[in-house]
């Protein structure tokens, strides 16, 4: 299983979203997701989240809330455990990302974006300020075939 982080930055009722359009072989190609990436050896999920936020956005998270774990299983791709974080306090200037286009998206428009179906589930949990959760998502291609909230 690959360990990754996924981070949602919030400001003025918007989420900072990454439209993944720059890599050819990318399970997230053409999808809109939060920022994040793979843990490096010896790195904690929080250290990874802070590093990835800075590398992909140029922002430094002042507060970072660890909100849940999402296990992502998709036919043809390695299983992935995503450590999910959220922040509404950060400093710095937004920069260009080499993995796609960054854009502040109003929350009310999130449903219009091409996203993983399971992302809509955990984004709702984030929005509801649900207690720490563990979500298991199983896909066949782009289709969510099973999800379990623990």
Image (tube, rainbow, N blue to C red):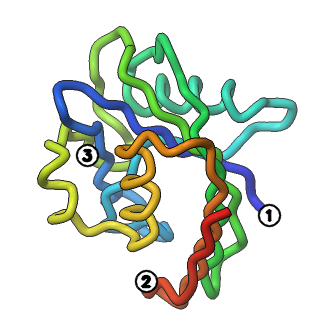
Q: Residue at x 21, y 55 (%)?
A: 110
Which badge, 2 or 1, is on the more N-terminal residue? Answer: 1
Identify the residue at image location x=44%, y=52%: 125
Q: For the point 43% across and 33% down, which residue is it?
A: 56
Q: In this view, does 97 lie above or below 120?
A: above
Q: Where is residue 24 in the image (x, y as percent from the top left)?
A: 42, 68
Left or right of 93 in this view: 104: left
**x, y (%) of residue 90?**
38, 14
Q: Name the residue under label 3.
A: 101
Q: Nearer the viewer, residue 35 or 88?
A: 88
Callout in the foreground (1, 3): 1
Is 16 displayed left or right of 113 in the figure?
right
Of the pair 120 and 94, the residue shown nearer to us: 120
- Whether label 2 touches label 1, CB < 8 Å: no
Q: Are marks 1 and 3 in contact (CB under 8 Å)?
A: no
Q: Mark 1 points at which residue?
A: 1
- The quarter holding residue 104 reads top left
- SS state under label 2: loop
Q: What residue would you read off at disc 2?
A: 142
Q: How far apart are marks 1 and 3 (CA)?
A: 27 Å
Which is more N-terminal, label 3 or label 2? 3
Identify the element where label 3 is drawn: strand
Mark 1 residue element: loop
Q: Residue 129 carries which label?
A: none
| Furthest residue toward right | 42
| Residue density around tag 3, few if under 14, some if 14–19, many if 20 or more, within 10 Å | some
Q: Where is residue 66 in the image (x, y as percent from the top left)?
A: 61, 33
């Amino acid at each position: 299983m690959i360990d990754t982080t996924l981070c949602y930055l919030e400001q003025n009722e918007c989420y900072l979203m990454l439209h993944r359009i720059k890599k050819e072989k990318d399970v997230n190609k053409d999808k809109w997701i939060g920022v994040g990436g793979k843990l490096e050896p010896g790195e904690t999920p929080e250290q990874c989240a802070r590093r990835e936020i800075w590398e992909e956005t140029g922002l430094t998270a002042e507060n970072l809330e660890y909100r849940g774990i999402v296990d992502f299983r998709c036919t043809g791709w390695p299983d992935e455990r995503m450590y999910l974080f959220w922040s509404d306090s950060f400093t710095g200037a937004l920069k260009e990302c080499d993995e796609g286009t960054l854009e502040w998206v109003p929350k009310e428009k999130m449903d219009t974006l091409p996203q993983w179906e399971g992302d809509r589930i955990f984004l709702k949990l984030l929005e509801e300020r649900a207690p720490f959760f563990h979500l298991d998502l199983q896909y066949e291609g782009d289709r969510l075939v099973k999800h379990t909230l623990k």
